[in-house]
Amino acid sequence: MLKRFLGYYKPHKKILVLDMLASLSVALLGILYPIVTRTMLNDLIPNKQYNMIIIAGLSLFVLYFIRMLLNYFIQYQGHMMGVRMQGQMRSEMFRHLEKLPFSFYDNNETGKIMSRMTSDLNDIAELAHHGPENFLITGITIVVSFLYLTSIDLWLTLIVFACVPVLVFVSLTLRKRMRDAFRESQAAIAQINGSLQSSIAGIRVTKAFTNSDKETEKFEEGNAQFMGARKNAYKAMGQFHSVTTMITDVFNVVVLIAGGLFLYGGKINFADYSAFIVSINLFLGPVNTLIRFMEQFQNGVAGFERFVEIMETEPETDSQNAEAVSRLEGEIEFRNVSSSYAEGKEVLRNISLSIKKGKTFALVGPSGGGKTTLCHLIPHFYKITGGDILIDGNSLKSITMESLRKNIGIVQQDIYLFNSSIRENILYGRLDASDEEIVAAAKRANIHDYIMSLEDCYDTVIGERGVRLSGGQKQRLCIARVFLKNPPILILDEATSALDNATEIQIQKALDELSEGRTTIVVAHRLSTIKNADEIAVVDNGRITEQGTHEQLLERNGTYAKLYKQQFREMS
């Protein structure tokens, strides 16, 4: 873990070295005041060297001005080094998140992921700046102060430093408790961020169902958990700080008593005793700095552990022999395919079916039967646990995921649109498309006229998740996006089930045109929309229970016929 963390300093070695040198210079300049104090008390004042007193004072003033400039460099450039490291980690995390499988996002809330990318990385940036500075410089300062104090009086120094093992023991004992408490606190922050993100994203549903009290209750539960975790963290931190501060206060008492006895016994003169009392802060200063730093250290360590946890999550990877393909023909075959969730629950069992190039294959059946999962296996969103899927006679495992997905277009019930312009949302289908191609795709999706009626036309920003558009307009934009992509394989996953009948009829015309010449897999709730499919399969409880054309399935008078007759009665 430490080696991995230190690796992020490599691109910033120059600024790190300069920061350490500046910090070391600041620490060494700090020792000048007690040295000058001792010299004045022992030499300059008794010998009435007033000119030297003035010169020494002015020299200190100049050196302290230099120290101010060094402190500015440390605070500015040191923090910027931490920010650059944070930016590097954030970029790595984002690129890694882009490679993670669907299963990761099934099990992790967006808000929690955001917490790791923001607050956790911010804690790491602070540790990256202050960590080396505090550990290295305070260590050097403690050694230098020890040597200087021994030059004043060896035995008095040894007596004072005898308290150090007690401080180290107590610090190590209490640090573990504080580390565990801060880990719990970081998890609680992620929890409340996840709850907050979910509540804000669903605010329209909350208002529609007048459930603001319920959302407030859920939020307060997370808020209470967060406050409880912070309470434990601050309790542990309070114990650490209070006990260690008491021990450092004891240092002053020891200096006062032991030094007084030494002065009384004539083993040290008054000037040296005064210089020793002033100089003991050279030691206590860095010790107190380390004590104050422990909270920041624990936050940074906990944040880096959570960062590493994300980075060590296995990304999607192509098979060793996978090759990129150009444009597929679109012939699909399932051979005894099974699929399970991570917890071992089997979703599909021994699915075998064949979809010819350019044909339309419909999937119907009860909710939760496995229709959407079957569709998600074609673009390799989830791994199969048994059997194989072939496209154009080639195993899915032999095709790189990127090239496979470039050949597949998906229109779902739950449309995701970005908070950007209409142009950019359509362009997502093929980023190198020209404006003419974007307009052509919009016309084919029957949304061009509506876009041109807007004040900013294709440059109109549609809001988060397309909130400024109707359900039908969102679907048309998604269809335009797929028209632009022009894939040989098309998946329509209940694309019109959330629309009213009039809008559905209009959208269905665009979908019919979109399906022409493509291998199309349709998941349908309304069976009237798939009557003309080349073949229909009923998926129930992870198995295909019936398969055939619309007429053939009606003749069998099985599940499909019952579903169709039921919907027909409801429509009439």
Image (spheres, rainbow, N blue to C red):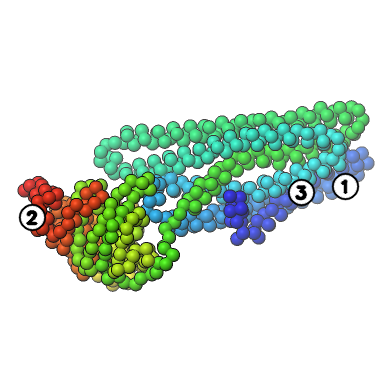
On screen, residue 158 versus residue 492, left or right, reads right
Q: Is mark 3 on a helix, strand or loop?
A: helix
Image quarter of residue 271: top right
Q: Which of marks 1 and 2 is in front?
A: 2
- Residue 475, image x and y in percent? 24, 57
Q: Do callouts 3 and 2 mark residues in contact (Cβ within 8 Å)?
A: no
Q: Which amino acid does the dot numbered 2 rest on?
A: Glu
Tell me the CA gap for discs 3 and 1. 22 Å
Q: Do callouts 1 and 2 mark residues in contact (Cβ within 8 Å)?
A: no
Residue 28 circle label = 3
Please report the residue visible at 67 percent of the width from the left and 49 percent of the height from the top.
133
Mark 2, residue position: 555
Q: Is mark 2 on a helix, strand or loop?
A: helix
How many marks do you count on the picture?
3
- Residue 28, image x and y in percent? 76, 48
Residue 52 circle label = 1
Between 80 and 343, the residue placed more toward the observer is: 343
Sequence-earlier tag: 1 or 2: 1
Whether residue 454 can be seen here:
no
Name of the residue lying farthest toward the right: 47
Please report the residue visible at 9 percent of the width from the left and 51 percent of the height from the top.
557
- Residue 104, image x and y in percent? 40, 50
Q: Which amino acid does the dot numbered 1 rest on?
A: Met
Please report the residue visible at 90 percent of the width from the left and 34 percent of the height from the top.
269
Q: Is mark 1 on a helix, strand or loop?
A: helix
